[in-house]
Image (spheres, rainbow, N blue to C red):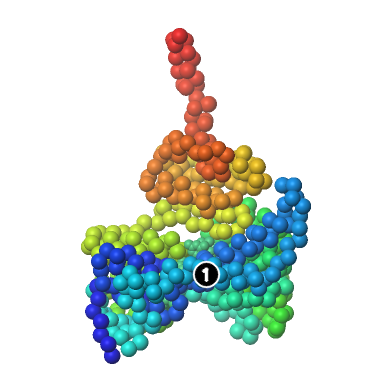
Amino acid sequence: MNRIKTDICIIGGGSGGLSVAAGAVQMGAKVVLLEGHKMGGDCLNYGCVPSKALIASAKQAYAMSHGSALGIADEQAQVDFAAAKDHVADVIATIAPVDSVERFEGLGVQVIQEFGAFISETEVQAGDTIIEARRFIVATGSGPFVPPIDGLADVTYYTNENIFDLREKPKHLIVIGGGPIGMEMAQAHSRLGCEVTVIEGAKAFGNDDPEMAAIVLNKMRDEGITIVEEAQAQKISGAGDEITVHTPKGDYTGSHLLIAVGRKVNMDKLDLDKANVAHDRRGLKVGADLRSETNKKVYAAGDVAGGLQFTHVAGYHAGVLIRSLLFALPSKMKTAHIPWATYTDPELSQVGLTEAQAREKHGDALEVVRFEYHHNDRAIAERKTTGLIKVMVVKGRPVGASIAGHLAGELISMWAMAIANNMKMSAIANTVLPYPTISEINKRAAGAYFSPRLFESTMVKRVVRFVQRWIP
Ligand SMILES: Cc1cc2nc3c(=O)[nH]c(=O)nc-3n(C[C@H](O)[C@H](O)[C@H](O)COP(=O)(O)OP(=O)(O)OC[C@H]3O[C@@H](n4cnc5c(N)ncnc54)[C@H](O)[C@@H]3O)c2cc1C
Ligand SMILES: NC(=O)c1ccc[n+]([C@@H]2O[C@H](COP(=O)([O-])OP(=O)(O)OC[C@H]3O[C@@H](n4cnc5c(N)ncnc54)[C@H](O)[C@@H]3O)[C@@H](O)[C@H]2O)c1
């Protein structure tokens, strides 16, 4: 058995683990990284990257058959489903070197390609190596939660871990789960020529503002996707390419089944109890400093930290950890400024409080400003006029923004910056943006906040009349 002593031992080479490793080693710490499966984790191999690549194929197919409004005759796109999957694989391969063992070893990280398990409060074993570290970062991520639905084990089903390898085009894809994974995959498959039915136990896009979610749901339904809500999948029957999902709203039969009902954090292999690391179903029990409540040598990053599960959150955790681990400075994460986006068409994005949350927290102090996409010249030119932005404002500062529409995932960054830096609405309103851009939607929303104050104020009108009398 080999023994290593190091400053930081990171368990898991996905978004969180790699971000900590790259930052810590380049600032002078001795770092050991354990990855038992694929470098890059879920995001690169089974998550963000393949899903966005498949969405890009689907967008192209959709554009070909919807050009007539722009004067380009609609063409029935000839979808080569296997070639679209080749594109997905190629995108992963193009990005993979950034997350590779070679790159990290080049930076000076000692990479061990084994799963790690705690053997004591201060040691982890990976293969035939025991690592003793000043600090451990658990960044083992999450995998698809497969629910105990009666009959599921008897049929072939897909999850995010193998749907991107499927090379034959499903005739009829049934998706169980109307969260971001289910809805992104539903629209992508529909646009690539599959019939698609989404079965959702509660509300689709349940984490988003219902008014914004409805905008996307309407579009997806218009495109021919069947979305059944309040329809918990209770039983599955059938075989081969006839699989039936039984719900209180009826039975739905398709040729392929995708399970997208949430995530299960990866802790099984860790032997956390041997290290006295408290945990529950959501992950390690950590505070805002991401430190284990029960073993002060152990920290968590990414999906296994028990909060929001996004790649940018894992990256944010890395920054919080680097500050406290490398410089021994107090460092705590916040969540009010974390945005997210779902890459359907139109996109859906959120930062800070939704309208309902803001109303509950701020009551009458809340003002909600709205601006619809169809007033934006660029959106009109591109015929992307379906959409809405709502900004929740308290005492002149945004406390939340919700966007449904073209490029919503890009537009939300301005509000994420404003909320992260406690900026006022005037900071957005005072910014000059190039015309004609979709970003002007943000500025117009800020303008909507000031318009009544300027244009409907008798005081402003009186002052203007007074000044006009005196200037030559
Ligand atoms: C289909 C899909 C689409 C997504 N799209 C987006 C998106 O568009 N934007 C976004 O922000 N987020 C998206 N996400 C979420 C994002 O992928 C995750 O939040 C992110 O990958 C979490 O990073 P992580 O480092 O916590 O875990 P991971 O990236 O999962 O990495 C964990 C790594 O730890 C390894 N590991 C596990 N146990 C051990 C062990 N005992 N020893 C050693 N190694 C171990 C695993 O093999 C894995 O490589 C998506 C997720 C899915 C499934
Ligand atoms: N664009 C992005 O950033 C992006 C994309 C995909 C995934 N993600 C991340 O991955 C996480 C997981 O996504 P997800 O969509 O798997 O999970 P989710 O928890 O967001 O949604 C799962 C949905 O499945 C439903 N459900 C559960 N059991 C059911 C049943 N038996 N029958 C019918 N419906 C059922 C739930 O009501 C819920 O709406 C997200 O929360 C997000 O953090 C992010």
Q: Residue at x 63, y 52 (%)?
A: 215
Residue 229 vertical position relative to residue 468 in the rendered view, above or below: below
Residue 296 location in percent, x, y? 26, 71
Horizontal arrangement in the rendering, residue 239 relative to residue 416 (left or right)? right
Which amino acid is tagged 1?
A: Ile
Q: Residue at x 69, y 70 (%)?
A: 80
Horizontal arrangement in the rendering, residue 305 relative to residue 367 (left or right)? left
> Helix, strand or loop at disc 1?
helix
Q: Nearer the viewer, residue 60 or 472?
A: 60
Residue 76 appears in the rendering: yes
Quadrant of the image for the N terminus? bottom left
Residue 448 vertical position relative to residue 409 in the rendered view, above or below: above
Quadrant of the image for the C terminus? top left
Q: Quadrant of residue 223?
A: bottom right
Q: Quadrant of residue 302?
A: bottom left
Residue 252 location in percent, x, y? 71, 72
The residue labelled by disc 1 is: 92
Q: Nearer the viewer, residue 131 or 302?
A: 131
Q: Residue at x 71, y 80 (%)?
A: 241
Horizontal arrangement in the rendering, residue 20 relative to residue 217 (left or right)? left
Mark 1 crowd level (few <14, some 14–19, many ≥20, 10 Å Cα)? some
Residue 251 appears in the rendering: no
Residue 106 location in percent, x, y? 34, 71
Q: Residue at x 74, y 47 (%)?
A: 71
Q: Quadrant of residue 163?
A: bottom right
